[in-house]
Image (tube, rainbow, N blue to C red):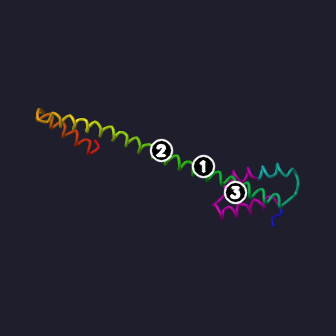
Amino acid sequence: RAHSLEEVLEEIEASSAAAYGDIDPQILHDATFDIECRTQGKNSEAFLSETAKALGNARMAIGLVACVNDEIQAALDRAESVVTAMAEARRQGYRVLHSVSQAKEVLSGMSAIAIRKLQLEVIEYTLGA
């Protein structure tokens, strides 16, 4: 069992490093300060040890949640760009469909230049240009 604050902190660092990787020194310092304030001079090693472990693990969990939040936000941003691209493709598709419908109605009276322009629009839409 640990008998001093330094030993407790070393124990926390060793157990947390095995579970999560190294504890950030600032997190460890902040946890130590919080524990010292809460004990108010009492020398309860069990309380100190349990509190330090809980505080260190909670702070590491907060860091993990922040990382997950960043990943979710990045996925949302990618999904939004896909939806935007699909909306633009739909708009372009309707434009070409409208042109094809018009061409179908007046195909007999269209000039070769108008037919060629329509073909180029279809190629641009198909290639995504």
Q: Residues within 10 Å of mark 2 (few under 14, many from 20)?
A: few
Q: Which residue is mark 3?
A: 57
Q: Residue 24 magenta-drawn? A: yes
Which quarter of the figure has residue 7? Answer: bottom right
Residues in magenta? 4-31
SS at circle 2: helix
Please determine whether, in this image, residue 3 is positioned above or below residue 76: below
Q: Nearer the viewer, residue 120 or 8?
A: 120
Q: For the residues marked 2 and 3, what is the alpha-carbon distance in whole angstroms?
A: 30 Å
Please determine whether, in this image, residue 64 is positioned above or below residue 93: below
Farthest front residue?
105
Q: Which residue is mark 1?
A: 66
Q: Which residue is mark 2?
A: 77
Horizontal and vertical percent position of residue 65:
61, 51
Horizontal and vertical percent position of residue 59:
68, 52
- Answer left or right for 37 relative to 80: right
Q: Nearer the viewer, mark 1 or mark 2?
A: 2
Disc 1, disc 2: CB below 8 Å? no
Q: For the residues marked 1 and 2, what is the alpha-carbon distance in whole angstroms?
A: 17 Å
Which quarter of the figure has residue 118? Answer: top left
The kind of residue on which mark 2 rests is Asp
Dominant secondary structure of the magenta stretch? helix
